[in-house]
Image (spheres, grey):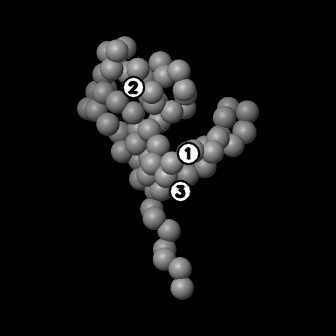
Amino acid sequence: MSAAPEPTTITPYPDGPLLVRGEIELRTPDGETIVPQRRTVALCRCGVSAIKPFCDGTHKAAGFRTDD
């Protein structure tokens, strides 16, 4: 008997990315699949990352702030 799948969680980090853990399916605006290289990914929410949809840490230099 196999173990139950790990639940997917999305954690917004203050002044930073969305950290996604668990099984996910990412797609481009055109519907193409983006294969994550890890089980935990950081998704950009500042809009400045050079590797969108993933976070590259640029939010720090850009001064991105959340309302949290």
Q: Is residue 8 left or right of residue 24?
A: left
Label 2 to label 3, Cα distance in Å? 23 Å
Label 1 to label 2, Cα distance in Å? 17 Å
Counting from the top left corner in percent of width and height, residue 51 is at: 54, 26
Most extreme residue toward the front is 37
Query: What kind of residue is marked 3?
Result: Glu
- Relative to residue 27, is residue 52 depicted above or below? above
Nearest the eye: 68 or 32:
32
Counting from the top left corner in percent of width and height, residue 41 is at: 47, 43
Question: Looking at the image, is mark 1 or mark 2 earlier in the sequence?
Answer: 1
Q: Is residue 7 left or right of residue 24?
A: left
Q: Label 3, on which residue?
A: 23
- Relative to residue 63, is residue 32 depicted above or below? below
Image mark for residue 37: 1
Look at the image and tell me in which quarter the C terminus lies.
top left
Q: Label 2, on which residue?
A: 57
Query: What kind of residue is marked 1?
Result: Gln
- Residue shown at 49%/22% (left/top)? 49
